[in-house]
Amino acid sequence: MIDHYSPSAEFYDMVAVRHIASSGPPLARVLAGIDTGRGPVLEIGAGTGRVTEVIAAALPGAEILAAEPSATMRAQLMARVARDPGLRARVTVTDGAAQDMALPDRLSAVVIFGVAGHLSRSERMILWRKLAGRLPEGGLIVVELMGVTAPRVIPPTMSLRETIGQQTYEWWIGGEPAEGDAMRFTTTWKVIHEGRTVREVADSYDWHTFDVAQLARESGMTARRIVEAGGNAIPEIGVLTK
Ligand SMILES: C[S@@+](CC[C@H](N)C(=O)[O-])C[C@H]1O[C@@H](n2cnc3c(N)ncnc32)[C@H](O)[C@@H]1O
């Protein structure tokens, strides 16, 4: 697996803060009240741990298994867990990637936010099958889709602009169709000081596009979409129910 997240991991939390403001509340609502007695709630691609905090708050009794393959992202996840006594007691951090992570025999639920397009369709099918075998009847896999359901041209657009200290950070994203169902995204972080760009960190990665209907076909589970919360549009979330 190529780690596309380490080069720009220092900036990621600026994205995550905004992301959690929109996607955190609907995720918390979907998870609220589920039975967590069967096994851990698995979070795949936990990033810097912002979604982990939402899961922990929504499910106060749950054990959480937070898997994050990028060492730089995982360092931030680990720091977030280590400084919070409530998280330390019940979040286990691993370096597992979706394709080959060791899984416990039983899971209560699964959360996979901002990750599933990093897997090809066949990799996802294998993953859904493995997860379904560990979930109870009615168990949930909550998948965030990122809002791109088919390859298309997305001109470079500034997605975020934040000032921290005396520097301003801009996040530019563009994309174009790649092979098959994939989009090739190019992202650039610009660090601006006194009106001058003093650093640029760029990367590109492929994202396999899909929609909720595709998820239902791949997984054999029932699927529903959540596209807004509190009247605001959110990156589409799919809820798969075994
Ligand atoms: C867009 S970030 C989302 C992080 C976090 N889930 C969130 O929503 O804030 C995608 C994360 O998925 C991880 N990732 C990429 N490929 C992966 C894979 N094959 N298996 C598991 N995680 C992966 C990356 O390292 C990165 O931390």
Image: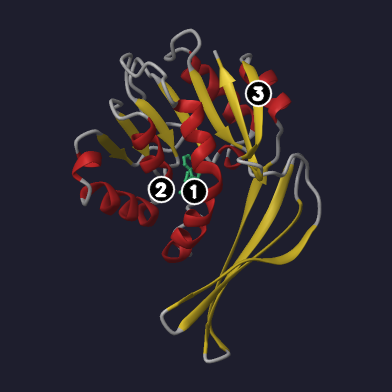
Marks 1/3: CA–CA distance: 20 Å
Decide which of tag 1 and tag 3 comes sooner along the chain: 1
**For the residue with label 1, is its CB less than 8 Å from the closest atom of ligand 1?**
yes
Marks 2/1: CA–CA distance: 7 Å
Circles 2, 1 touching at the beta carbon (< 8 Å):
yes
Residue 224's label in the rendered image is 3
Kind of residue indicated by mark 3: Arg
Answer with the quarter of the image where residue 176 lies: bottom right
Pinpoint residue 49: horizontal percent, then vertical percent: 38, 47
Pinpoint residue 171: horizontal percent, then vertical percent: 59, 67
Kind of residue indicated by mark 1: Ile
Q: Give SS at disc 3.
A: strand
**Residue at the spot x=32%, y=31% of the render?**
64
Q: Is residue 110 shown above or below 231? A: above
Residue 63's label in the rendered image is none
Q: Is residue 101 visible?
A: no
Q: Residue furthest front?
A: 230
Residue 50's label in the rendered image is 2
Q: Residue furthest top?
A: 137
Answer with the quarter of the image where residue 13 lies: bottom left
**Residue at the spot x=62%, y=63% of the render?**
187
Mark 3 neighbour class, 10 Å CA radius: few under 14, some 14 to 19, many 20 or more: some
Decide which of tag 2 and tag 1 comes sooner along the chain: 1
Marks 3/2: CA–CA distance: 24 Å
**For the residue with label 2, is its CB less than 8 Å from the closest atom of ligand 1?**
yes
- Viewer-proximal residue, 229 or 154? 229
Q: Give SS at disc 2.
A: helix
Pinpoint residue 160: horizontal percent, then vertical percent: 60, 66
Q: Residue furthest right?
A: 153
Q: Is residue 79 visible?
A: yes
Residue 20's label in the rendered image is 1
